[in-house]
Image (tube, rainbow, N blue to C red):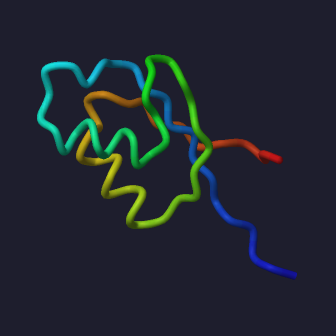
Amino acid sequence: MAAKKKLIKVTQIKSPIGRKEYQEKNLIGLGLNKLHRSKLLEDTPSIRGMINKVSHLVEVEEADKAA
């Protein structure tokens, strides 16, 4: 069996308006473009790096067993 992939839930809590362009692009890269939208993402170093760049705009939670 394949190993279970760890998932994290990322929710956008603040707007990128007035922020630097790379921050808006990181949100789009995470699949977020409107307030209070959430995405389930695989917990990888590249995703964590993107989250760190916009940590003041998003909220991160560990996802329970997701479909």
Q: Residue at x 43, y 29 (%)?
A: 33
Residue at (40% x, 49% y) in the render: 29
Please report the residue visible at 31 percent of the width from the left and 46 percent of the height from the top. Answer: 26
Does residue 57 sit above or below 42 in this rendering?
above
Task: Name the residue furthest right.
Answer: 1
Q: Position of residue 48 (x, y in %)?
A: 38, 56
Q: Quadrant of residue 17?
A: top left
Question: Quick check: 52 left or right of 3?
Answer: left
Q: Quadrant of residue 63?
A: top right
x and y, in percent, of residue 62 in the image: 58, 43
Residue at the outermost bottom position: 1
Residue 24 in picture, x, y percent from top left: 26, 36
- Closer to the camera, 3 or 14? 14
Image height of 26 relative to 33, above or below? below
Residue 47 in which image quadrant: bottom left
Image vertical order of residue 36 relative to residue 12, above or below: above
Q: The N terminus is located in which quarter?
A: bottom right
Q: Give the number of callouts.
A: 0
Q: Is residue 48 rendered to the left or right of residue 23?
A: right
**Front-most of residues 24 and 55:** 24
